[in-house]
Image (cartoon, coloured by chain):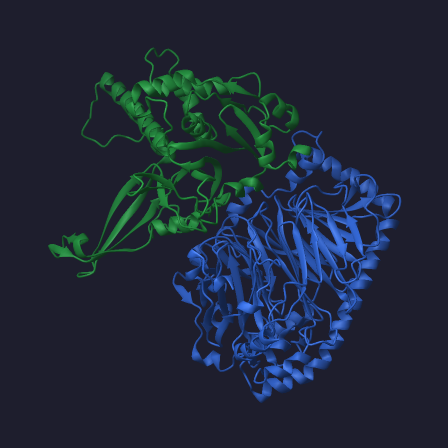
Amino acid sequence: MAATGEGGGKEELKTHFITREGTYRLMPLSEYSKPTRVPYNGQTNTPVKVSFIDVDDGSGSPDRICFNVGRELYFYVYKGVRKAADLTKPIDKRVYKGTFPTCHDFNEMLISSESVRLLVGFTAGQVQLIDPIKKELSKLFNEERLIDKTKVTCIKWIPGSTNQFLVSHVSGRMYVYSEELPCGPTSPHYQPFKEGDCFAVYTCKARSTRNPLYRWVIGSGAINEFAFSPCAKYLAIVGQDGYLRVFNYDSMDLLGSMKSYFGGLLCVCWSPDGKYIVTGGEDDLVTVWSFHEKRVICRGQGHKSWVSAVAFDPYTTTLETCDSTVEEESVKKTENKNGSNNTVLANGIYPHSNPNTHDTRKPTQVVNSSSANSVITCYRFGSIGHDTMLCLWDLTEDIIKLPCGRLRSSVVASNPTPAYSSNTIPRCNSGNTKTNSVVNDVSVIDGHAYAIGNSTVSTTNKFATLSLGDRRENSEKKEHKRNFSLVSRSSDKSQTLKVSTLRPQPDNAMKLLGTHSCPRLTEAPLLEPLVCKKISVDRLTSLVFREECLVTACQEGLVYTWARPGYVGLTQQHTVVSENL
Amino acid sequence: MNNFTNSLKFCYKMGNNPTQLEREIGSVQLPANEHYFGLVNFGNTCYCNSVLQALYFCRPFREKVLQYKHQQKNQKKETLLSCLADLFYNIATQKKKVGTLAPKRFITRLRKECELFDNFMQQDAHEFLNYLLNRVAELLQAEKQGNKTKNGDNNSQTKPEPTWVEELFQGTFTNETRCLNCETVSSKDEDFLDLSVDVEQNTSITHCLRGFSCTETLCAEHKYYCEVCCSKQEAQKRMRVKKLPQILALHLKRFKYTEQLKRFTKLSYRVVFPLELRLFNTSDDAYNPDRMYDLVAVVVHIGSSLNRGHYISIVKSEDIWILFDDDIVDKIEASSMEDFFGLSSDIQKNSETGYILFYQSRE
């Protein structure tokens, strides 16, 4: 409502935009906010984040939406583009005092129509586990702030786990918790577990196992966001020091890194096939990094301010039957690196000629891309920023295939050639891809289950070594300490100085310029956005691509739903009906 | 460790006195050999105090001023530069790490030297910075000339050698004009000591700098006289940075003169600025186009208009950030910088906003 509303500056706000797939339209009746629809004028700067969960309750509206606004946290039935939002009856609403929610994540493993498990991170460092449906569950972690006193910046369940989760803080540390363990009455004592270039992992030394299980110290400055790869094996972390770092989560090995052109990196997202990572940051740029080639593929310039969220759109992705050897190799590589390289591509493959049939399709269905003969040739991703703008980008084959290190000074427009548009999903109805997706549905489910089993095993393994190898690690720890005291100037202050030894030398960041980790401006293609629209009054904070729509949220606490082309007409009918009701 | 979590607002309102700050931070965590001295306000002299603190924490500038102090030990004549050198020397040689000083001689001298500042009114901090840098450069130039005439090799014809003020702050932008008739590009270089950029709502300083280099078409009454065509022609003009200064001082043009009100009103737009900066608007022949800058100081304007309000400064000292509010000194977190970006809504005019940014080159 607000976007088309009366307010002075609001007239210039866009309510629709056109891409090659068609027109995306803002659904005014599908706007979510506080029940009063009063814009929030912050006492806090905590960004409004949105989480979705599908509770599969057999009703027409199985989706639930959670978002935080200031001191409040809301949990509603999300009716998508089909029906108008009913803001009068949130399923759950929480108001916090003294500390504000900053981020949240639903557990994907334990879901039913009667119960979901939601983790919430807070400005003062605490973490709460709640069930917004059952409501009786409430567990607090780091309640006394003995583990970390700084703001929680990102929180995620470890993929496939029902009890372990990862929390990052402004302090530059991340902690692995188990919801079944206590946090202990004292500050934890740590001992080194693993060390590497600009990072260190510690375990918590205690008589009985307690939280946190691990502490990761990464780079210098705040960790702003992290994301697990679609295969759940890898962890991408972006921070205020301007670095993207990618780890093998289980082995805790640093596999690659990238540096922003300048300033902190604020957000990160994996491509659906796990090949690329896109970041956004304080250089006003989006940067695409190839995980396999360990290099910056391109940068995108379109925002007028910092980029606060990036997301790949798995539903708008172009597939092509794999024929060239180069592509086959790259697929094989993927296979080797991550045995179950599952992606959500399947959703893109479904023909969208009849959107009504989509109710039964679950967005969790996945395709094993390695068994399919198709590879992605064009990736779609979106970004939003402090400039109140939404940008959409196409990462096309010609950009991806540019040889490394080749100098390009010209601006490459990302507007696709007509050749691509014929292959474009979801508008594509080719029989070939359709069969592929059907075949793959089976193998996918297999692969998915396999991946889950795998990660559970490895985490429990680690757990065992942890408690058994206590003594030997003790002696190791002493050696480490000596090393630390040699580097640091004054050895008396423990925690802060240890971090400072992890600080990447500014010289290092300077030396990176001109390398694959941070090419000069002229050394990497510079994309222009496909779409760049001002859609909000206040800065944008959250972006989610869904099958039938994309969802954006802004600092004022307004959550907008933008219907994808093909879903607009349908919605209008339905909204009329729901209005009449 | 408690102080790490205190938000700026909290500290600021508490109005901690310096000794409290010292006790709270604990001398261990304060960088060695650094001194944090608040400056007493002599009646609306916060515009001056905030700029002085920012310049003191531009390390290369401070070092040059202290060097000057050592070289000019027996100088009898009082100048604005000698007063500045005395003040910096006074801060740098304090026994205590944290305290308060009264920059009385400097203010008196300033009021004596410049009519504009000879009153008790609030002044524009940027205007003061400009005046100070130019005055210091003039004084240094005059001293150089004086030495040269003494030595007898008076070559007044040649372009004056740059002083250390120019070495630190001076950059060059190149003004490229392309005649749309004959396509000839002519370029003219101009030096700057700081860049004044227009501000827009919900943008970044990076965007504002790019706006500074936007291509502008000269047409109608603004036509350009092309020397090749020998006539007035339509032309395209853009300004790009050719030589990047060691210290990049950016002035956000937040005060707009409104004809109706007959006064300057403040643009409280939210303009974000990162701790690390590179420039996008460099010319093709720039000597060091990808220079990396670190934010070292920010002069913040608090209030609703140019002549009403208050200035404070935030400076970086090694890895910690210190806030100077006249005689009050406080430690703040880098993350609370966002409190000084400005406001997203245009309704409120009263704001605490970054006004002058000092970025120092990394190498």
Chain A colour is blue
Q: Residue B294: image x %, image y %?
A: 49, 40
Numbered label tally: 0
Q: Nearer the viewer, residue A129 or A74?
A: A74
Q: Within the image, what quadrant is residue B137 found in?
A: top left
| Of A361 and B36, the residue lying toward us | A361
Q: Pick whichever, B269 or A419, lies toward us.
A: B269
- Location of residue B261 in the rendering, given as x and y in whole percent from the top left corner: 31, 41
Question: In the rendered image, is residue A144 in sight?
Answer: yes
Q: Could you tell me which residue is drawn at 52 percent across and 19 percent down?
A: B100
Compared with residue B294, is residue A274 higher up or lower down, i.e. above or below? Answer: below
Q: Along the horizontal axis of the image, is B228 left or right of A111?
A: left
A174 sits left or right of A351 in the view:
right
Quarter assignment of residue A491: top right
- The spot of residue A404 in percent (x, y) is 50, 63
Q: Is residue A576 above or below residue B136?
A: below
User: In the displayed image of the protein, which residue is found farthest to the bottom?
Assistant: A431
Q: Quadrant of residue B246?
A: top left
Can you give x and y, in whole percent of width and height, for residue A541 in the image?
56, 56
Residue B360 visible in the picture: no
Q: Residue furthest left?
A: B230
Q: Going by the image, does A478 lie left or right of A241?
A: right
Drawing shade for chain B: green
View extreme (front): residue:
A580
Q: Is residue A328 left or right of residue B152?
A: right
Which residue is located at x 40 percent, y 44 percent?
Answer: B267
Quarter holding the C terminus of chain A? bottom right
Q: Residue at x 21, y 31 (%)?
A: B158
